[in-house]
Image (cartoon, rainbow, N blue to C red):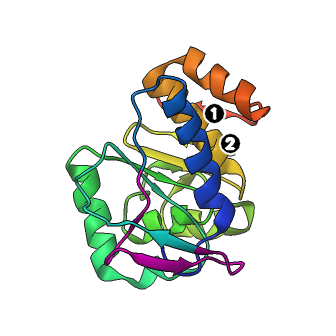
Amino acid sequence: MYDGVEEQDVIGPRDVLGHAEAAGGEIRTTLVRPSAPGEVTCFFGTKVTVPAAWEPTDTDLLIVPGGSDRLINDPDVLRDLVRAQRAGVIVAGVCTGVMVLSAAGLTKGRPCTTHHLAKAALAAQGGKVIDARVVDDGNLVTTGGVTSGIDLSLWMITRECGASIAASVESVMEYEQRGVVWRSA
């Protein structure tokens, strides 16, 4: 999380993953900030207390939410994203959070997607833009649209924990995963 983050990009995935944990999935979620624990002011003014600093290799999945371009201009964050992926972390981007991954060079030459207003910029930076809601290229998973973090999380639950856990979460949330999931072979 960071100042200016889009609320839905964080809360959607957090909610889905929390319900998956409650349904018996082997999941533990933590909100993190690049610098240190503390308060974050989101895009629409919501204030969130973030309990932990980000340690790039201390996770299996890192979800980078969109919002402002604050992280795009942070060389330490960009370096740490590369370090995380090299260490085996699945790096995922929600909406314009994918542009942070692009700034780190993670999308160059790879299938990816982002918010429809940023697709041309993503392609110009070397991403192979796919017209899909979720694009799964192994250790890089990207999504397009503000609410796509919900679909990203449901897909990751399906991929890592199984369809029954994902279906259980969909039932509790009264939400059905929407859009195409494009997956590399």
Residue 40 sits inside the magenta stretch: yes
Residue 63 image offset from top left, x and y in percent:
46, 54
**How many callouts does the rendering have?**
2
Q: Which numbered dot is residue 31?
A: none
Residue 177 image offset from top left, x and y in percent:
72, 33
**Mark before the other along the chain sequence, 2 or 1:** 2
Q: What residue type is labelled 1?
A: Val
- Nearest the camera: 137 or 21? 21
Horizontally, residue 37 falls left or right of residue 143, namely left
Residue 136 sits inside the magenta stretch: no
The residue where tag 2 is placed is 132
User: In this picture, is 184 found above or below 69?
Assistant: above
- Nearest the camera: 168 or 140? 168
CA gap between label 2 and label 1 equals 6 Å
Horizontally, residue 76 falls left or right of residue 138, namely left
> Which segment did they paint magenta?
30-47
Residue 132 image offset from top left, x and y in percent:
68, 42
Dominant secondary structure (helix, strand or loop) of the stretch shown in magenta = loop
Residue at the image position 65 percent from the left and 66 percent from the top: 7
The residue where tag 1 is placed is 181
Q: Which secondary structure, mark 2?
A: loop
Q: Which secondary structure, mark 1?
A: strand
Residue at the image position 69 percent from the left and 45 percent from the top: 131
Q: Which amino acid does label 2 sit on?
A: Ala
Q: In which quarter of the image is the C terminus?
A: top left
Residue 155 image offset from top left, x and y in percent:
57, 33
Residue at the image position 31 percent from the left and 77 percent from the top: 36
Any part of residue 177 in sight: no
Query: In the rendered structure, are the residues bearing label 2 and label 1 in contact, judged by CB atoms less than 8 Å apart?
Result: yes
The quadrant in which residue 60 appears is top left
Neighbor class of circle 2 (other Cα within 10 Å; few <14, some 14-19, many 20+) is some
